[in-house]
Image (tube, rainbow, N blue to C red):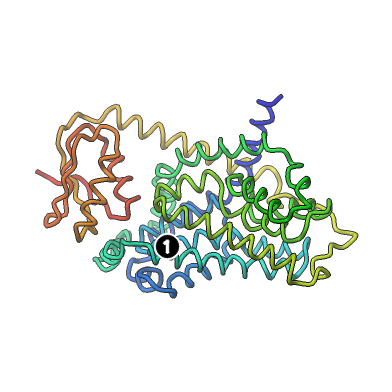
Amino acid sequence: MTFNHFINSLWVIICEMSPYILLGFLIAGMLHVFVDQKTMSRHLSGKGWKPVVKAALFGIPLPLCSCGVLPTAVALRRRGASKGATTSFLIATPQTGVDSIAATYSLLGLPFAILRPVAALAGAIAGGLAVSATDKETTQSKSICEDTDTTPQTHGFLPKIGEAIRYGLIDMVASVGPWLVSGLIIAALITVFVPDTLFISLNKYPILAMLAVVAVAVPMYVCATGSIPIALSLMMKGLSPGVAFVLLMAGPAANFASLMILHKTQGLRATAIYVGSVVITSMAFGLIIDTLLPSSWFTLSSTAAISGSCHTETALFPTLCSILLGILITYTMINRKFHNHNHSLTMTKSYKIKGMACSHCKNNVEKTLMRLEGVESVEVILDKSIAVVAGNVDDSAVKNAVELAGYEYLGVENS
């Protein structure tokens, strides 16, 4: 029974997530093909508050969940966005969206619908500025953006669309897929084994209730729209509007899948700031709702009813999206193993890498490549823009690692 519940929960999570993550992969492909580095450099690179605010404002209306936003954010980072701006985008985007704002208004009223994007903006700016203030990779971001534009030189609109789809649904899936699968399994386990009555029993202790909501909602998958009926049901059972608001904000902002990929692409410090910004902002606004704002603003109508789930479309569309996502992940995994199996043994290779400009870049690339299985040693030669790798490692693994580190992989250097 428990196993069936786990499988069912995992399938429900995948069905809720798959349309949005596929959309995220496609957006990532579009960014890769159509957004040049000079434009991204001008708007989202560098320190300061402007790129952070722009990233937050750009992300708030997008209808992407915490998983769907990941490939888009990784693409933004690869196109030259700073860590601060990328973190701001990652915080703001999954907490809101034009669809969830409309659904919030219809079920919970205008005050909730206004406070959600306001809180998302505040948390995104705070988190982005914190990451920007502690980020020491200013030279890397500058070198990525100021070099010659690396937007694919594909001519014609239809070929560009094809390249965008290929990059989004093949390359991005290959990079993110394994981490996504691991995170979804953990999220499903939490969904099955954490009791629903946990929050209600803590209603007499608002701060403790908020912390309990955060402890369960942050790693568990729930989209911005899907959190609305959950928050409504908890309020109808007597939970305070402030605690329900914490669920609305903290739940969609993160889950194990997103946190694992965020740690991989942004680093431990940025991930900690990301989680801290989400938690502190959601709890701060929750306390404001419960202590400072009129309770009449958050009184539910007697006719309020829980309706809808995460999405309004029929079951067929998310099912087809889930099947497509599964096929893509399986294909990329098999393709990677096939290339690994058939790759001829080469003890030493030189890889051409664009964007390395200083000793920090050198250390970053060397540490990144040394983590790959089969690598024995790595030496970066800055003046030649190459990394000399000794060992038995697949070229595609080097390519993925280099791009995730924020540099451009140009291929194997000819002898």
Residue positioned 76% across, 42% down in the render: 197
Residue reaching furthest right?
302
Location of the C terminus by quadrant is top left
How far across and how far down the image is residue 37, in percent? 33, 66
- The residue tagged 1 is 131
Position of residue 63 in the picture relative to residue 131 (left or right):
right
Viewer can see residue 146: yes
The front one of 241 and 60 is 241
| x 45%, y 50%: residue | 262
Residue 226 visible here: no
Seen in the picture, residue 397 relative to 359 is either above or below; the reply is above
Residue flagged by tag 1: what amino acid is it? Answer: Val
Residue 257 locus on image (x, y percent): 52, 44
Residue 190 percent location from the top left of the image: 62, 38
Image side of residue 302 versus residue 139, left or right: right
Q: Residues within 10 Å of mark 1 (few under 14, many from 20)?
A: many
